[in-house]
Amino acid sequence: MVNVETALKEATTTIEGAIGAALVDYGSGMALGHVGGGKDLDLTVAAAGNTDVVRAKVRTMEMLGLKDEIEDILITLGSQYHLIRLLKGRNSEGFFLYLALDRGRANLAMARHQLKKIEESLEV
């Protein structure tokens, strides 16, 4: 098991095209940790904004009566992918990993696969 800082560093160093990563509590919208980002990507703002996305999708699923779990949510921009992966392990419900990728350099399928592996090793 790895801690938050180690997991986020792993995401930004092993996932091709990674711009930044954060672990977010979607109850509060607060980032519990983040790595990367910069002047063009404020991960604290992204964490809060993506919390609204997760809450809206959870609410919609409840209204539709869907008895399923969200694995991940993908937002495709012109130059970036934003990947939101909800955590499922014990003591990790209510959190998501957020990963921003440079669309020109990233392999989305591999990024999803690697983010899942990081989730499995993460201890919140």
Image (cartoon, helix red, strand yellow):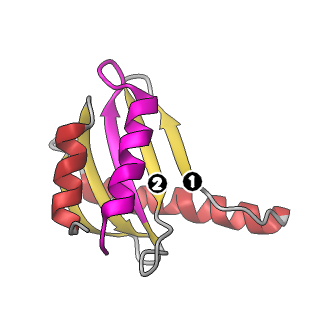
- Residue type at mark 2 is Arg
Image coordinates of residue 46 in percent, x first then y, are: 35, 53
For the magenta stretch, what is the residue range? 96-124
* Residue at the spot 80% in from the left edge and 62% down from the top edge: 66
Residue 121 marker: none
Image coordinates of residue 100 in percent, x first then y, are: 33, 41
Quarter of the rendering containing residue 61: bottom right
Circles 1 and 2: CB atoms closer than 8 Å: yes
Q: In this rendering, is residue 50 above or below 67?
A: above
Visible in this render: residue 41?
Answer: no
* Residue at the spot 44% in from the left edge and 40% down from the top edge: 112
Find out whether residue 112 is within the magenta segment. Answer: yes
Disc 1/disc 2 C-alpha distance (Å): 6 Å
* Residue at the spot 16% in from the left edge and 51% down from the top edge: 9
Image coordinates of residue 90 in percent, x first then y, are: 46, 79
Q: In this rendering, is residue 54 above or below 41?
A: below
User: Given the current orientation, which residue lies at the most extreme bottom position?
Assistant: 91
**Residue designated by label 2:** 85
Quarter of the rendering containing residue 114: top left
**Residue designated by label 1:** 71
Find out whether residue 9 is within the magenta segment. Answer: no
58 relative to 61 in the view: left or right: left
Quadrant in which the C terminus appears: bottom left
* Residue at the spot 72% in from the left edge and 62% down from the top edge: 68
Bin the neighbour count of mark 2 within 10 Å (Cα to Cα): few under 14, some 14-19, many 20 and up: many
- Residue type at mark 1 is Glu
